[in-house]
Image (cartoon, rainbow, N blue to C red):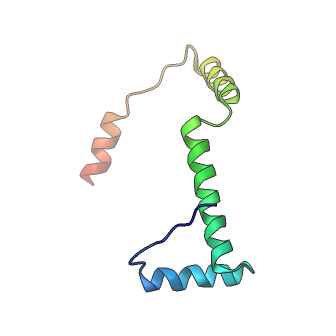
Amino acid sequence: MAQILVDNLDPIILKKLETLAKQHGRSLQEELKHILRQAAETATHYHTGGNMEKAREAVTRAQVRYTGKTFSDSTELIREDREQ
């Protein structure tokens, strides 16, 4: 398995990571693996759009719900709010 070396890590960040590890009952190395795993899974889910079939179904439902409805232009409301 690969190893990673992190140079010049801020000591405050290291202390926070050690505290997190202790709170979760893990070693620092286990905590870092957990954080990296979560970050990788989140990024993968975000970039692939998760379940595309469910996303398409949600878009279709929204299109049906809003078909034929007219919405006001909010530009004037935003201008008024900014001027306050």
Left or right, residue 76 beside residue 65: left
In the foreground, 16 or 61: 16
Q: Which residue lies furthest to the left in this view?
A: 83
Q: In this view, does 81 lie above or below 10?
A: above
Give residue 64's quadrant in the image.
top right
Q: Position of residue 70 (x, y in %)?
A: 49, 20
Q: Position of residue 66 (x, y in %)?
A: 58, 21
- Quadrant of the drawing holding the N terminus: bottom right
Q: Position of residue 50 (x, y in %)?
A: 65, 37
Q: What residue is at 60 percent from the left and 19 percent from the top? A: 63
Give residue 44's quadrant in the image.
top right
In the foreground, 75 or 39: 39
Q: Which residue lies furthest to the top in this view?
A: 68
Total marks in image = 0
Q: What residue is at 51 percent from the left and 82 percent from the top? A: 14
Q: Is residue 17 above or below residue 77?
A: below
Q: In this view, does 47 lie above or below 56?
A: below
- Quadrant of the drawing holding the C terminus: bottom left
Q: Which residue lies furthest to the right in this view?
A: 25
In the foreground, 17 or 77: 17
Q: What residue is at 29 percent from the left and 45 percent from the top? A: 80
Left or right, residue 20 beside residue 73: right
Q: What residue is at 46 percent from the left and 72 percent from the top? A: 6
Q: In this view, does 43 lie above or below 11?
A: above
Give residue 58's quadrant in the image.
top right
In the foreground, 79 or 20: 20
Q: Position of residue 48 (x, y in %)?
A: 58, 36
